[in-house]
Amino acid sequence: MDLDAMDDTATGGPLAGLPPQPPAPGGKALWLAEAGHAWQPDQLHLLYQPLASLQDGGIASVEALLRWQHPEQGLLVAADFVPEAEAAGRIGALGEWALRRACADLAQWLAALPAPAPGAAPALCVSVNIAAHQLHDAAFPALVQAVLREHGLAPASLLLELTEAALLQDAQASLQALHRLKGLGVQLVLDDFGTGYSSLGNPKRFPFDYVKIDCSFIRDVVSDRGDAALTKTIIAMAHHLGLKVVAEGVETEAQCDFLRRNMCDLIQGYFFSPPLGQAAIGALLAERRSLPPELRRIQRQKRSLLLVDDEPNILAALKRLLRRDDYTIHTAGSGAEGLDILARHPVDVIVSDQRMPGMIGADFLRKAKDLYPDTIRIMLSGYTELQSVTEAVNEGAIYKFLTKPWDDELLRGHVAQAFRLKEIADDNERLNLELRSANQELAAANRRMEELLQQKQRQISRHEVSLNVAREVLQHLPLPVIGMDDGGLLAFVNSAAARLFGPGAALLGSEAAHALPELFPSGAAAPALPHDEIRIGAARYAVVVYPMGESSSSRGSLITLNRCMEPQ
């Protein structure tokens, strides 16, 4: 989300006593501090907008949207004051308040929901925006972990959203910070993808779980071929990378149906629900609000027919004839009205007149083909302008041309045949969707495995560095130090010990009892007991043996020799 995306009041906390500033001269934005006034925490509110799953239709998560009930300016969205909070260096306190409030509300909702099966995804998640300052704050992961523990939440139930602009302020530091957050088990969301700084490489480079398609692409997705193509591309790219896709700003059934057919995972927008307060979200969850079955992925839809004719009596006669076949029937009196219906409702088959004012049938069906290529299009007309009809047929805009007056049974048969053709195409599409769903799950599993492998490799690298540091420290100690494995073989000889017994390289791997007989008096199988004294040459040494493995998985013994002072 952006921070505009976060009802409930709260008291106390990190925002207590933060003073706001006056509006900039001639501007609408409000600054954080104003002389003599305090920004009271109980003026802040979180609203939550649900995200609906296109797989099962239910509420998968909610996005927190921040609001400020200013005593003079009224209710302000985040865009009115969050930028100034960042500029004033107060975004950390604001973000911490939002995180704590959102997690407290989530815990309350989850307490009223059935617990998921072991190993299953959380019953509900909450999304909270983080700013660049929070991302790069070394103490932020510890804060997130503490808040999750405080409310008893699974890390995967928290989604942290940030924009590419926040990432690219310092890409390398952002990558490291995101890996630290992923190590906690939380999920990461790339917000507003497709705008501003967007790069196709960023979803691959950074360890995100979700990509959000900006609402500017969704607004005209059913009427603009460019927006439709870009949206399809983003969905396909994200799925190949093992990411889930959220579409923001979904306001119509047609937009939702387009996204369903193109395998989008989640939708967010006023079509499903506006932002609501904490209690209202609880009521939605209690009533199990969900998308209707026809708007879920891999569902068989009820057959839908669009009749277009400028003569009302013709439309009435056609509707009376065809409604006996249990179609959902829409009617339009012009091509423009027909396009409007197509933008708002899913349609399988179109039956259109040719001679209509404003837009002839052939042109209407051409536009329908361009915008809704999956429809089956029939022309029914008593007027034939041969050239335009022939061109439309040749272009694939018209499936069949039928004449008026029509034979009732023949017309019903042609329409039924068109629906059978559409059902075959739909069955193929369902199989394709099922295959794509399986591929998406496989890609997501591969991405998780790759992230786990990278995490293990980073741990191994850190352990190797620690081991090398420890080895170097032991190597330079003035005290002779010898490492022996549990099989009695020499595994380590530092420089001081090599000067005492001989070259370390020659000693490594040999049996300690043979290579260093001084440590094994009278042929003993074990080295001298701790604090025994032995003589090497003219000098006496106190032997200390440290058994390994008490606080680690290591085995064997570490032996040190400390030279004793000879009596005067």
Image (tube, rainbow, N blue to C red):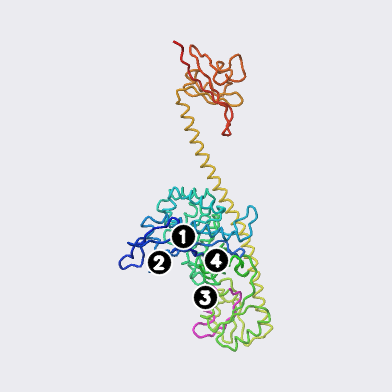
Distance from Cα at disc 3 to Cα at disc 2? 49 Å
Q: Please, what is the three-letter code of the amino acid marked with disc 1?
A: Thr
Q: Quadrant of residue 429?
A: bottom right
Q: Please, what is the three-letter code of the amino acid marked with disc 3?
A: Lys
- Which residue is found at the position 61% from the left and 74% from the top? 348
Distance from Cα at disc 1 to Cα at disc 3? 57 Å
Identify the residue under disc 4.
Answer: 279
Q: Seen from this angle, which residue lies furthest left?
A: 25
Badge 3 density bin: few <14, some 14–19, many ≥20, Cα 10 Å: some
Badge 2 density bin: few <14, some 14–19, many ≥20, Cα 10 Å: some
Q: In which quarter of the image is residue 306?
A: bottom right
Element type where label 4 sits in the image? helix
Identify the residue under disc 1.
Answer: 11
Disc nearest the viewer among 3 and 2 = 2
Identify the residue under disc 2.
Answer: 70
Magenta span includes 358: yes
Identify the residue under disc 3.
Answer: 367
Disc nearest the viewer among 4 and 1 = 1
Magenta segment boundaries in residue numbering: 346-371
Circles 2 and 4 in contact, beta carbons < 8 Å: no
Tell me if residue 403 comes above or below residue 203 in the rendering: below
- Which residue is found at the position 48% from the left and 70% from the top? 219
Distance from Cα at disc 2 to Cα at disc 4? 22 Å
